[in-house]
Amino acid sequence: MFKGSKASHYAEELHSARLRGHSAARRMQSDVNGSAGADFPELLRKFAKHNPEQTATADIVRMEYEMHLGIASFFESEGFCDASYSGDSPSHATFPPTMPPGLKTTEVVREHTETFGQKMQERELFIADATGCVVLRAYGLFMQGLDAEAAALIHGSRLLEANPLANNKSGSRTAQLEQHVAHAILGAAVAGLASERLAIQGEANERAERAQDALQAYAKANSFHEQLRGGAGTKAARTQPFVDEAERWLEVALYHNALLTMRVHGMEKGLECLRSYQAKESRWPPSFRMPQRNVLRNIYASALNNARTTEDPTPVSANEAKAVRSTAPSSTWTNEYAAMRRTAQRVLEKSTSFPRSGESNENAESLADQLVLSWRLDGAQGGALADEVVDLLYGLSRVTFRSQTILRLLVQMLIAAEAFQESIFVLEKYMLLVQSTWQATGVPLAGQRKVCEGRYVDNLQQYIDTVLLGAHVELTYLGNAVASDTLCKTLLRFVGVLPKEADTNDLLPVCDTDDSTMARILRAAGRALAAQLQHATTTERSTLQRDAKAYLTRSLALDAQSSESQYLLACLLAELQDIQGATTCARAALELEPASLDAWHLVVLLLTAQRNVGGALQFAEEALTQAEVDEEADAQGAYTQLVSFDYPPTQRERAVSYLRLLITHNVLTELMEGTQAALAGQKELFAAFQSRVASVALDSQSQARLSSNDAAAPQTFARPTGTTALTASPAIARENYRARTERALLLSLWLLSAASFRRAGELEQARDAIAEAEQLDSLSPDIWVQLSFWCIDAQKSGAAVTCLYKALSCDPDHVPASVTLARLFLQPNAIHLHASHAESIATAATALDGGQVLTRLSLLDEGVGIDLESEALQSRSRLLGVHPGDGTEQPTSAQVAPAFAWRHDPSLPPLSIAEGLLRTATTQRGHSSPEAWHLLAQVSKHAKLSRDVQLRQLKEALRLENTRPIRPYHAALALP
């Protein structure tokens, strides 16, 4: 290589290293592009050797290098880094700390600052070196706290009026030229920082002028950058994310420009600056200046939310006795919010940083709050839109440390996404984290915003709200009343309603709370206890009833305007056969919430319990009309909300409530107008299911995400792994949940239709309807019971017995199956079980495919039921027979419940079996079945028990019959 080419080569390399930012990259490792680092002195030596005529340039570069190293070393000793900006807001901006006198690094910067001043006087300097001297001297003055001198130097040099590319006739972009412009950007940024700090510290009469000087300097920095690299969308912009000194100092200028503009000119102008900042983000790697970018994203989200709240003020309070409708947001607001979400997601997907203990979560947690608030203001839509926020929150969990805020918001958003099991998984971690933190820091009272070690500590109200939400999910969506009760008891002990357990390590104090919150806790606790009544034994039931009623009554005393408390108490009283009290509470609930479909439905059922079938039918028609009026209003962009409910039903849940009410209306129609009228009305039932409830597949947004992002969500967004209880993504969990609930609802429609066809004498259509139900869930005991009724009407009592045993193999405590089988065994011509089959029945009941095994068993006496069994095996329906190899085999299903343990004695006669069935039913789930008590009285008569026993059982049957609704409350209202 010739000497001239070496001189040019090392000059280009040297200026490239300066442009990359040798000091910051070496000391702080703040970008991903690498640096000259420790090789820079050697590179400078080679440059000086091969360019002896550029001694002044070499001296300037050496001093620049040493000054940057000194400043970086000072920042490191002070703990100043990007994370130091996390607490910024429009009213406060962070500045680099000034270097105090006496430090070795300060002395280096001071000496070089003076030398740069001397160099400025040299006339033979290249223009780039002259600019460098001015800018680096100003930077040194700024770092020493001499803001007025720094700003005056930049303005006096007329740097902000110059064009650093004016002498570039060729249009080429050499490293030296780019370094020259980077120095110009640095100079403009320093002038802005110095003027802004003077505006904050100066007298009132000069603040406005200094602030305007700062804004003009920041704008000039952006102008220099535009001249060098063009806009974010131009060809001049590099396609790959990168960072150099031009980008670093541009970010500083844009960041401070946005915050200062908001402070001086208001949020509207500030949003324009925020958008300018976001436009430049595309050229930066995800890890670059993450705290500063999160600050601005947080402010941007907050501004959007404030604008939306101003357009649509918060509706009436939750205690006001009426339903409200929230208006749809404008398309502009929604588009801005969606763009903000996408920007945050792109950054989080590629970020690899994880905070260390002691680093601040404050800004990321505030951003998470704003994201969820934006989602709520955007209509709180579940599904794919909730999935997006879940993904962002999981991403934020990777850039925060032990964040209670992120976990709490994840619980909320996973529920919105209908990933209920996963929400409980996160809730458990949230509760442990909050309780351990409180033991160390104390319990922040409701309304307090406490920060400990850079992390927000949830206060009492936030913790209670989140645990109550978990209790609601456990009971309503997961059907786990015991788990819900456990969460409620945790809160009851926490607020002093229940004593703390002696054998626990609960060191948290008992806390007071307001009446509204106490009412919610008691309401949830009463609901969880009431839900356990269906499976309680006789000894447990009285305690559960007493406590549930006490909790709900006390809740209502604390919050008299709660429609939900009135409704829950009405349901409990209805189950206790207190029809008058239940009616009073149900009508009060309806007056408080006229849009509550379940309250309307409960009043209809209570009217039938009072034998007012005509009034019930009329009331049901009025309720359906009211629901349709609400739906028409909702279709215009509004959404009906039950404001006095703790967890108002979603639009989908309201649609399901409408369908359940329509089913009751159909049953009343059959009773009043005949079976044919009911069958005609059932067409409307199936149409309503298809139009309002059915979701054959996920919506298009969910489907697209499921095929792309969701499959990788656990890896990309650090979702919980290592547990088989969770699905691969919220979208899959939602699909599974909706499919399960829709199958159950559609199955009930087919069974309703089958019963109506059977009562109309149309057995062929009834059998087809049962077969349709079987396609949905072959292990549903209700299907087997309905088929047993069909067999009885078809004069096939033996096959009916087979069906009922299959029903009991699926659910050994199924009341209709137990009662119907007992009725058959009490008939004079009861079909006896063959003694040798008793053990086989018990074995089949515990098998994974117990339904299939039972189908292949002969359950009838030899010589009596052979023809019936043969007919059953040849039936078209898989319910009565499985033909090996013909494609009708049932797939292996979930475990079938063990049953018939008490029937292993082959000497038991049918009467004893009937007695066992009825005594089990009346003691447990069938305690409110009048048929069960009536049949038990017949058993007592056959067994020659005392007349008092028989009379007591008959009176109980009569009492229950006189207060029985047209449909069971739990089934009709889908009570947990």
Image (cartoon, rainbow, N blue to C red):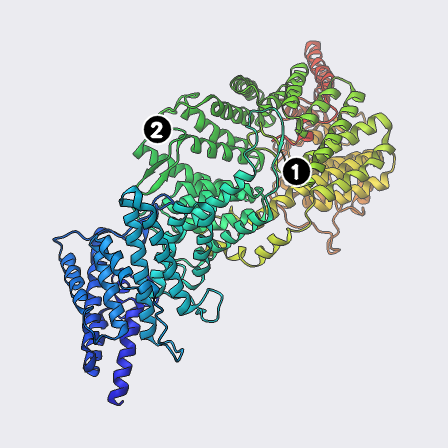
Tell me residue 843's x, y (percent).
62, 41
Where disc 1 sits, the SS reads helix
Q: Residue farthest to the bottom?
A: 2
Tell me residue 813's x, y (percent).
64, 31
| Sequence-first tag of 1 and 2 | 2
Q: CA distance from mark 1 to mark 2?
A: 47 Å
Residue in front for this viewpoint, 291 or 547:
291
Q: Quadrant of residue 454?
A: top left
Q: Measured along the vertical axis of the image, is residue 427 above or below residue 197?
A: above
Is 208 left, or right, of 621 in this rendering?
left
Where disc 2 sits, the SS reads loop
Is 770 left, or right, of 222 in this rendering?
right
Q: Measured along the vertical axis of the image, is residue 881 above or below residue 349?
A: above
Q: Residue farthest to the top?
A: 948
Residue in front for this viewpoint, 797 or 130:
130
Residue 875 shows in this picture:
yes
Tell me residue 210's x, y (percent).
31, 50
**Quarter of the image that includes the N terminus:** bottom left
What residue is shown with label 2? 508
Which three-letter amino acid code belongs to the residue tagged 2? Leu
Tell me residue 65's x, y (percent).
22, 67
What residue is shown with label 1? 809
Q: Quadrant of residue 415?
A: top right
Residue in front for this viewpoint, 264 or 915:
264
Kindly indicate whether the residue at mark 2 contacts the one at mark 1 (C-beta within 8 angstroms): no
1 or 2: mark nearer the eye = 2
Q: Measured along the vertical axis of the image, is residue 832 above or below residue 561?
A: below
* Within-10-Å neighbours for mark 2: few <14, some 14–19, many 20+: some
Identify the residue at horizontal 35%, vertical 57% (top origin): 217
Residue 838 shows in this picture:
no
